[in-house]
Every structure is written in C-alpha cells, then in structure tokens.
Amino acid sequence: MQQDNRKPRRILITGGAGFIGSNFVHHWCNSYQGDRVVVLDALTYAGNKANLASLENNSDLRFVQGDICDRTLIDHLLESENIDTVAHLAAESHVDRSIIGPGAFVQTNMVGTFTLLEAFRQRWNKREQPNDRFLHVSTDEVYGSLEANDPAFTETTPYTPNSPYSASKAGSDHLARAYFHTYGMPTMITNCSNNYGPYHFPEKLIPLMCINILLGKPLPVYGDGQNIRDWLYVEDHCRALDVVIHQGQPGETYNVGGNNEVKNIDLVEQLCSLMDELAPDLPITPAKNLITFVKDRAGHDRRYAIDASKIKRELGWTPQETVAAGLRHTVEWYLANRDWWQPLLSDEYKNYYDQVYAEPNLS
Ligand code: NAD
Ligand code: TYD
C-alpha cells in the first residue's frame, strides 16, 4: 500500500521470526523504507533469526528476543521506541502441538495477547494519536468446521473453536475486540485461512510433505485425506495485513482467504507431481508412492472456507497468487533452501515427530 503522503510508522511486529511474521517483516521493510521496525520474538522452536538474515544490515530494523508475556519488556519497548503500531503475530500456532500440550497455547496466545493489549492501552491512555493501531492477527479456525455445502465463514459467523489452538486464538480475538468496545482502543482483527510459502516451519502440511519427499520418507495423510483447507500464499496475507493497518477501521474484523479450497489428498498429489518435475535425484519416484494414510488427528476439522468479500469491498484487497503458481514457487524455494530447513530437523523436532506420527512405519 504505497501512499505519497503517508506518515511514517513506528511498528512493533511480534512473532517476526516465525513464518508469516518474517514474511511480513520483509514486506514492511521493502515497502516502507524509513519506518522504524521493531521485532519482538521469543525464538521458540518455531522462531528462527535466519528468516531475517537478509535484513541484518537494515538500520531501520531492530530485533529483540523476548516474551510477549513480559510486561516490563513490552512497556519499555513501547516507550523507548515510541511505537504507534502493533502487528501482533506471535503465537503458538500448530494444532498437533496444541493437542499434545495445550498449556503453552493458553499462556502465549491468551495471556501474551492480554499483556500486549494492556501495555498498549496504558500508553495509549497517555498519548492517544490518530495513527495508533493494534492489529491482532488471527485464524479462520476460530469459526470451527464446515460441512461440504455450508457457506464460507463471514465476519459474523459464530465462533466455534474445536482445538486448544483455535480456542486460545478465539479467546485472544475476544480480548482484542473487547478493548475497542470497552476502551475505544484502535484494535483490528484479521482472520485468515491456511498460509503457505517460504520460511514455513517443517511441521506444517506443505513443508512437511516437501521435505519428506526430498528425504524419501512416508507422506502421512490424516484420516481419509478429504479434509479441505482454503490456501493463501503468504505474501498475499502480508498485503492484506498492510492494507488493514493503513485503511482498516478500528474495531473491525476482516476475513482474509485465497478462495482456493483444496482437499488435502489433492494438495499432496500436486506437491508430488511438482517434486517429480522439479527435483533432481529424488530417492523415491514417483513421489506419490510415498503417500501413507495414517490415524486421523483428534477433533480434526473437516473443512475451512473464507468469504473475503468484506476486505475486497471495503479495502480493495484480493489475492494475487494462484495455488498452481504459489505451490510451484514454494516447491522451488524448498529445493533451493536446504540450508534453511535441514538444521530445523533437530532432536526436538524428531521427538515431536515421533510423538505425533507414532506408527512404526512412518519415521
Ligand atoms: P509460527 O509458529 O511460524 O511463528 C510464531 C512466532 O511467534 C515464532 O517466531 C515464535 O518464536 C514466536 N513466539 C511464540 N511464542 C512467543 C512468545 N511467548 N513471545 C514472543 N514470541 C513468541 O506461526 P505463523 O504460522 O507465522 O503464524 C503467525 C500468526 O498468524 C499466528 O498468530 C497464527 O495464529 C496466525 N495465522 C497463521 C496461519 C497459518 O496458516 N500459518 C493462518 C492464519 C493465521
Ligand atoms: P496444518 O498444516 O497442520 O494446518 P491446520 O491444521 O492449521 O489447517 O494441516 C493442514 C491439513 O493437513 C489439516 O487438515 C491436517 C492435514 N495434515 C495431514 O494430513 N498430515 C500431516 O502430517 C499434517 C501436518 C497435516
């Protein structure tokens, strides 16, 4: 969103070393040179400073390792950096991990969001400025699961979260909403569908399949593989967050989605075909021979679909990437960036993998 008369912002991006957060930091630094960008990230297993390596010499950018539950640190950053905008992306984000250990999800997603909102409110009470914004980045999973013929989620679909992950995100959405209605604080919420693209941590469906194909490992498809997700290329999501910060109305929620509903099994087969075409010397070809149906995820939501007509109508945002092109870029990126993903297959990751994919033929 380039505007000639735009006032520079001083933005705090939480979770900026994660998948979407780091793509958003790149997007912001490329789009708005001269803005102050402060990244706050705890560098959990999902955070990776290498995601920001190419911005190392950017003097507008400051990286701070820290926890969003640390109120003293947040107060200090908001004051000392004179922050006017928060883009809040830090979260525990993986459904399978929330099934194994929900506590971290309640702590970061709910207590952490509360801490940020309170710190921002205290400062906003003292120095209310027209440009101030607090964007809370959330997920379509708060709306629950759709049947095959249900209409897509709109901003007024009732919340029905089914996993500890989506329940903790729903709780944080309600807090962000309440801070506008009770205090008038300029919060906005985005609820987005499944993202994919560069810097996606290996545990999620698309990178997991890409990496397992390259390693010749089984491709674990949960249940019957007929679950549907609405996939959005991560750069399209970043453009949506940008447009909401600049043009969104305080107190409003915007759904963001790719209008790209795909069954998991079809997606995995597309990835297999792309790898067969693009990757030299695969251990197993055709890659689809690696597909293995495994025990379903507990409480697995059947279908997500986003109606993104509000953000299109009110703010002019539409996705630009097709799934075919976006998946091709993504496969090419994982092929070209082994040095990025290989170190992420750590002992911690292997332990996690063994817990989730416990069947002996899968490791
Ligand atoms: P991610 O797991 O890749 O990254 C999360 C980042 O937050 C990591 O860098 C991690 O170190 C950091 N973090 C975690 N706990 C923290 C804490 N207590 N304090 C500070 N930093 C902490 O997640 P993602 O996929 O990039 O998701 C970003 C946001 O977007 C999340 O809020 C998620 O709910 C939302 N979202 C994700 C998707 C998706 O498909 N990935 C879709 C819609 C919405
Ligand atoms: P995921 O990337 O974990 O995103 P989410 O659960 O937040 O939608 O999973 C996307 C879909 O892929 C979901 O329906 C679960 C399924 N899935 C598998 O079939 N196998 C896997 O190994 C993983 C990680 C996911």
Image (cartoon, helix red, strand yellow):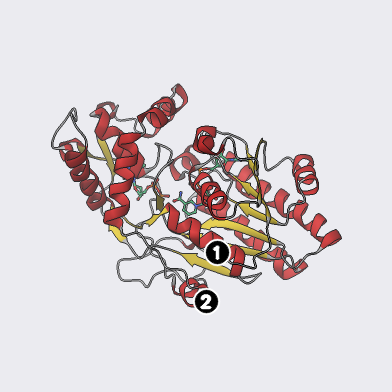
Q: Which quadrant holds the N terminus?
A: bottom right
Extreme-bottom residue of the structure: 313
Nearest the eye: 60 or 165: 60
Circle 1: residue type: Gln
Instruction: Determine the residue positioned at 50% across, 62% down.
Output: 240
Q: Which quadrant holds the C terminus?
A: top left
- For this view, does 108 lie left or right of residue 236? right
Instruction: Look at discs 2 and 1 and give the one toward the viewer.
Output: 1
Figure quadrant of residue 171 = bottom right
- For this view, does 288 lie left or right of residue 9? left
Q: Where does residue 207 sit, x and y in percent of width and height?
A: 35, 40
Residue 47 appears in the figure: no
Instruction: Determine the residue positioned at 26% across, 51% down.
Output: 267
Nearest the eye: 349 or 30: 30
According to the picture, the residue beneath numbered tag 2 turns out to be 314
According to the picture, the residue beneath numbered tag 1 turns out to be 2
Instruction: Determine the residue positioned at 32% across, 52% down.
Output: 326
Nearest the eye: 205 or 10: 10
From what the image shows, is residue 89 above or below residue 236?
A: above
Circle 2: residue type: Glu
Residue 67 appears in the figure: yes
